[in-house]
Amino acid sequence: MARKYFGTDGVRGRVGVYPMTPDFVLKLGWAAGKVLTTNGHPLVLIGKDPRVSGYMLESALQAGLEAAGVHVRLLGPMPTPAIAYLTRAFRASAGIVISASHNPYYDNGVKFFSSDGMKLPDAVEEAIECYLEQELVTVSSEELGRAVRIDDAAGRYIEFCKRALPGDMSLKGLRLVVDCANGATYHVAPDVFSELGADVIPTANEPNGLNINDQCGATSIGHLQDMVQKYRADVGIALDGDGDRLILVDSRGEMVNGDEALGIIAHDRRQEELLRAGVVGTLMSNLGLEKAILRMGLPFYRAKVGDRYVMELMLEHNCYLGGESSGHVIVRDHIPTGDGIVAALQVLKAMLNAARPLHEVKQVMSKYPQTLVNVPVAQRIDPDRSEPIRLAVADAEQRLGERGRVLLRASGTEPLIRVMVEGEDASETTALAEELASVVRQAA
């Protein structure tokens, strides 16, 4: 069944534009509640990032769930991975996050976690969509759900994150700049690192509902790079608006992305039995990461782009480490979803174990130059079904040989063909990417 509302990460859109409207979110809460009401009064947690529309949508979602007979626990502003963790801790039927992640303040979204802290299976999302097409019928008054606000949610999550660092290890002596993206981690991330002993300089930790992800956080690290240099920090930590992405900055002001973070963590833990099953990246993961993981003697798998697909492949191969270059890093023995704080602690642990700074430990992999060209097309086409495109790709792959790779894929959200070429030589990858983009334009 083709899903009408759910994308790869829940329902998302511009606030006030259908479906991100109060009436739809109320109906969404009711529909989710109907799917979950299989045994008695289920319990659902609701958390949100601090964007201004979250309070309006929270009220609508709460009303819909209660109308379906679901009890609600309100967590307030909390990171997405915190909802995943607390859903399991409270033995809840589901967790719901009101967030548009790294998007600007005028967007928002609703995403769900199952009772095990993982993204909902497609079949459950499809069942929710079926109820969205039905008339909303409220349960009787005695069966209505009730809501309670949880006051210690932040403290619970802080203690959980701290356990990602071994009990005999301290961050004392490290100076960290922590960029909270004016988002959901503003009141937890600085405390996690400072309570573990680090000298913490927080930034973008004063959300006003409108400044989330605004020239800050994991998608805009220029300010963090400047602060790392200004304060002579050892590491800069950039989280996104809902706290599930991580981008790092080393003491030289250079960016360390999700691929490099994966490489660092894998190298530090390569002797552990849990890592023997391998590491999962995506189709967009840098070839340098793949080669580094293989040199460690570990298998490397590529999932479709999207953290839910990374997790699916991790489960299929029983892997405990996976992620995306964008900064979603899943350390599954700690939490089964991307968690920027937990991932940062794993990188810091690797630095401490190696007794080396970040710019040295990141050398476990060498990033290949990568060129990405987005080619607009009048209508969506399948590159694999176009003879001229297939011939051009085959020619490019032959010219690169073992020195690189080519990837063409249709965007899942826009009428674009994404042309990616990576290899050892930057000028060669750029030239090949432009050649392929030209063929795609002619074929489209």
Image (spheres, rainbow, N blue to C red):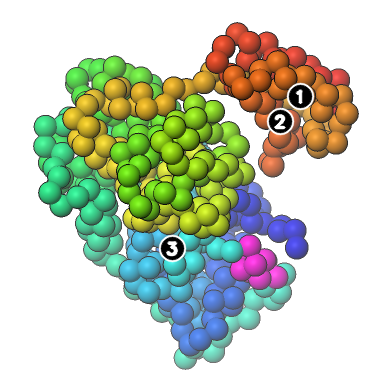
Q: Mark 3 or mark 2: which comes first in sequence?
A: 3
Residue shown at 55% from the left, 57% from the top: 316
Decide: few, some or many residues near mark 1? Use Cα within 10 Å; few <14, some 14-19, many ≥20.
many
Residue shown at 58% from the left, 82% from the top: 138
Q: Report the predominant secondary structure element of the magenta stretch.
A: helix
Q: From the image, tell me which residue sits under label 3.
A: 117
Residue at the far top in the pictured view: 427
Seen in the picture, residue 59 relative to 307 is either above or below; the reply is below
Secondary-structure class at tag 2: strand
Q: Are marks 1 and 2 in contact (CB under 8 Å)?
A: yes
Which amino acid type corresponds to the residue marked 2 in the rendered image? Answer: Leu
| Cα gap from disc 1 to disc 2, whole angstroms | 8 Å
Residue shown at 59% from the left, 64% from the top: 121
Seen in the picture, residue 188 relative to 3 is either above or below; the reply is above
Q: Are marks 1 and 3 in contact (CB under 8 Å)?
A: no
Residue 21 badge: none
Asked if residue 128 lies in the magenta stretch, the reply is yes
Closest to the camera, between mark 1 and mark 2, is 1
Which amino acid type corresponds to the residue marked 3 in the rendered image? Answer: Gly
Which amino acid type corresponds to the residue marked 1 in the rendered image? Answer: Val
Q: Which residues are magenta?
A: 122-130
Residue 393 badge: 1
How many marks are shown on the rendered structure? 3
